[in-house]
Every structure is written in C-alpha cells, then in structure tokens.
Amino acid sequence: MCGIMRESLRRLASDEGIRERRAGGDTRRVRVELMDGDHITVEVHRKARGADLLDKVCDSLDIVEKDYFGLLYLLRGDPRVWVDLGRRLSKTFRNEPWDVRFAVKFYPPEPSELQDDMTRNQLVLAVRRDLVEGRLNCSSITYALLASYRLQAELGDYEPGRVSPALLAESGPIPLRVFTPDMEERVEELYKKHRGQTPAEAESNYLESVKRLPLYGAELHCARDSSEVDIVLAVSAPGVAVHRDGYLQARSMNAFGVYNDTSVSCVVYGTDARGIDIKDTTPQGDFHKFENPATVKGRDQLSNIEELN
C-alpha cells in the first residue's frame, strides 16, 4: 500500500511539474533543498545546464568556493546520484519534478584551509546531516565533543542550565542509542571548556575533529567481492577503502588504509552491475575484484563502521 501511495504521489508531482514547465515559457522553477532542511526556489532558463543551477544556488547563499558543492537528485534514493553539471537540466529530469538537494560533493581533507566562513558553515551542516542519515558514525565520546562545539558555535559561552536533552537533540545530533544522562553531563563539561571561542573557531574545531573519522567525506556503496562476500566500498579523496562487517580491510595499502588512485586498474559500468578491479601494491599483492549488482545487500554494515577510540 505504501508503495502504491508513493508512486501516486510521484506521478502527481510529475504532472504538476509538466504543467509548471509549460506555463513558465522559457524558464523553469527548481525546488532546492538546502543542507539545513530549508527550501528555496530558483528560476533557470529551460536550456540551462546543471552548472548554471549550481551557480545560482551558491550565489543565493553567498558561497564563493563553489567547487566543493554539487546537486543531488532528490527522488533517486540511495545510493546518492549527482546531477551532471555539464548536461541540460531538461535532459536530466525530463518528466520528473525539477527537485534537487544542495550538498557537499568534495569534502576538503583539511577544512582549516577553507577561505570562506560560509563554506565552512555549509560543511558543518553537511557533516551534521551525514551523522543524522547514518553515512558517518563515531564513538560516544566524539558525539559529545561535536555537540559541545555546536553549542559553543550557536549559543556562545556556557551558562548554567542551558544544556537540555531537547537542545542536544537539535544541536548534536546525538543518536538515541548513545544518548544517556552521562552523555548530557559529558557534553556540558566539554561545553564549559570552550569558553571564549568565537563561532568561527568553534566550527573550525568541530571540523578538525570530524576530519579524523574513517568515513569523513566518503561516498558509501554496498558491493560484493570476488568471494561473494558483502562489503562496503568507501570512496573519498584519499582513495577507496574496503569495509567488511564494519572493519577496514585494506590497512596495508597506504597511510590512510585505502587503495589510492594508482591502485585502481579498471572500472566497469554495465546495465545491471558496476565493477572495479584494484591492484594490491604490496610485494605479494594481487588483484581484488568488487561488484555492485542490483541484488547486492549489506546496507546494515554501514551503521557498524565507526571510529575506534
């Protein structure tokens, strides 16, 4: 029943989108979901490309460092699919609603090198969303530290009685599985230590803590290795990390514990599957094959990949 309702709503949204496109002449309205959950509407020419839309969104948010950002299809689900910036939007969406999500596509390995406060703020929002949606996990200690930095950035210096479960849920986010009275006390004690930090300094410290997490900035893909074992591939700036049952498998590859770009020998795309061949660069190394068929399962593994403190 839920599936039928979702399909009906999607068709309704598609029909409304077609009517809106015809009524708008040479322009189209695009609904953009921002990283804080708010929405804006951006008008673009019907022949505009993805890059034109991204420029308008960044301009509306006063973002100068645009290269870190991208646009996600809002209706494509998981794994996330990025809008092709070089393609016309009319060919990208066709009869689908022109709805996108503004997101960070390239996470800077060193957030401290960001030049613009707005870029840093958007990165904080992106990381927070990654934590909420389960793409990024950490220990309870780190959850508490991140929550304390968020409180300092949003509220300023500590005042007695300010920390509450509702406030922590809003500023954390702290998952229910790790939220305890001890957690609240820990956040409060850490919050006290940040006295005197400006919002920009607190956000910078937040990002310095986040960048050390194993899955910071990683795109996660459920896959299956050559032994038919379900795994998770984490693709990020350092390279491709392989996780099995929540544990990193490729620690011998380099200092980051991942396969770097020189180790990837072949990437294969197909209708029903995608594959990747990776060459182990150790002296006794061999090839590792990973596939991502439509039937691959293993999404439950993602919630098990955490930092080890």
Image (cartoon, rainbow, N blue to C red):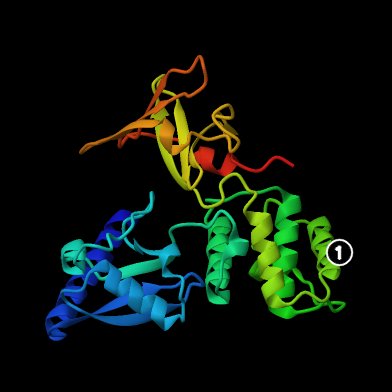
Residue 262 point in image, percent of width and height:
42, 34
Q: Position of residue 54 (x, y in %)?
A: 34, 71
Q: Which amino acid type corresponds to the residue marked 1 in the rendered image?
A: Glu
Q: Is residue 1 left or right of residue 124?
A: left
Q: Nearer the viewer, residue 156 or 281?
A: 281
Q: Nearer the viewer, residue 293 or 119?
A: 119
Residue 170 visible from this viewpoint: yes
Would you identify the image quadrant in which residue 10 lies? bottom left
Element on which disc 1 rests: helix
Residue position marked by numbered label 1 in the rendering: 189
Q: Name above or below for residue 154 compared with residue 109.
A: below
Nearer to us in this view, 28 or 181? 28
Left or right: 35 in relation to 7: right
The residue at 17%/72% (across/down) is 15
Quadrant location of residue 16?
bottom left
The crowding category of the residue bearing disc 1, from other C-alpha atoms within 10 Å (few below 14, some 14 to 19, many at least 20), is some
Residue under the point 48% across and 33% down: 259
Residue 105, x across and y down, in percent = 43, 58
Instruction: Please say whether residue 175 is visible from this viewpoint.
Output: no
